[in-house]
Image (cartoon, helix red, strand yellow):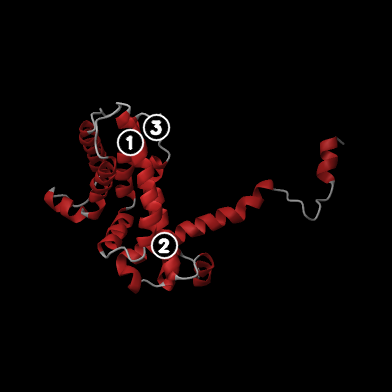
Amino acid sequence: MTNNAVADARPLRRNASPDKGRKYRPGRIRERNREKILAAAEQEFAQHGFRGATIQNIAERAGLPKSNVLYYFSNKKQMYAAMFDDILGRWNRVFTEIKPEDDPAQALAAFIRTKVEMSRKYPLASRLFAMEIIQGAPFLLDHLRTNMREWVRGRAEVIQHWIDTGRMAPVDPVQLIFLIWSSTQHYADFQVQILMVENKAEYEKRDFDHAADFLTDVILRGCGLQRPS
């Protein structure tokens, strides 16, 4: 019998695991459940608003017991805030890590294209955010004053560095960020209007590809840049 065979024949110790990967399984389950809950919350809040939405309905949409949902989020307000944190992180992730040494055309083009794609994949998220802002941001006010304000200032500093070093035309960095946010989210927030004007029943993937190309060309040209090939 080989050494390996002897090792295989030994009884496993009580704390040993035959599958080392299993120790990560609880974490993966928690992550998947949290994603399910937040996705269900987007649908529920979009349909019924904050006051009309219920944790029971969110649990049913997520396919989880209500007790499981309450394990992750102790109340509806906490879930609502977590949902927006998830939405905003998803939107801005690609532009969060920009650095002064990055190519401005590539960084801005990636931000624009990603934001358009977010409007395609997560239109409800965009509409929820728009409704929250229109109502005076009662649940997001602290976030806007702190995290978002700091995020915009940090990105604006990098854009200003690109301007100061002659790598792009002098534009207002904060207004540029506002322009990218509003123009890309337009395709989700005003979907009905766009489809009616263009006489379409629904969007196609190529519509978003065309919008991303158009916005990238126009915005970069206004910054004295060309769209990366």
From the image, tell me which residue sits under label 3.
100
Q: Nearer the viewer, residue 134 or 39?
A: 134
Q: Nearer the viewer, mark 1 or mark 2?
A: 1
Left or right? Give the position of 181 relative to 200. right
Q: Amino acid at mark 3?
A: Pro
Q: Quadrant of residue 209?
A: top left
Left or right? Give the position of 126 relative to 6. left
Q: Amino acid at mark 2?
A: Ala
Label 1 and label 2: CA atoms lie apart by: 29 Å
What label does residue 81 carry, if any? 2
Q: Quadrant of residue 30?
A: bottom right
Residue 23 seen: yes
Q: Nearer the viewer, residue 81 or 195?
A: 81
Label located before the other in sequence (1 or 3): 3
Q: Amino acid at mark 1?
A: Ile
Q: Quadrant of residue 129?
A: bottom left
Q: Residue at x 30, y 27 (%)?
A: 167
- Can you say which quadrant of the picture contains the N terminus? top right
**The residue tagged with tag 1: helix, strand or loop?**
helix
As drawn, the residue found furthest toward the front would be: 164
Q: Nearer the viewer, mark 3 or mark 2?
A: 3
From the image, tell me which residue sits under label 1.
159
Looking at the image, do the residues carrying marks 1 and 3 touch, with CB atoms under 8 Å apart?
no
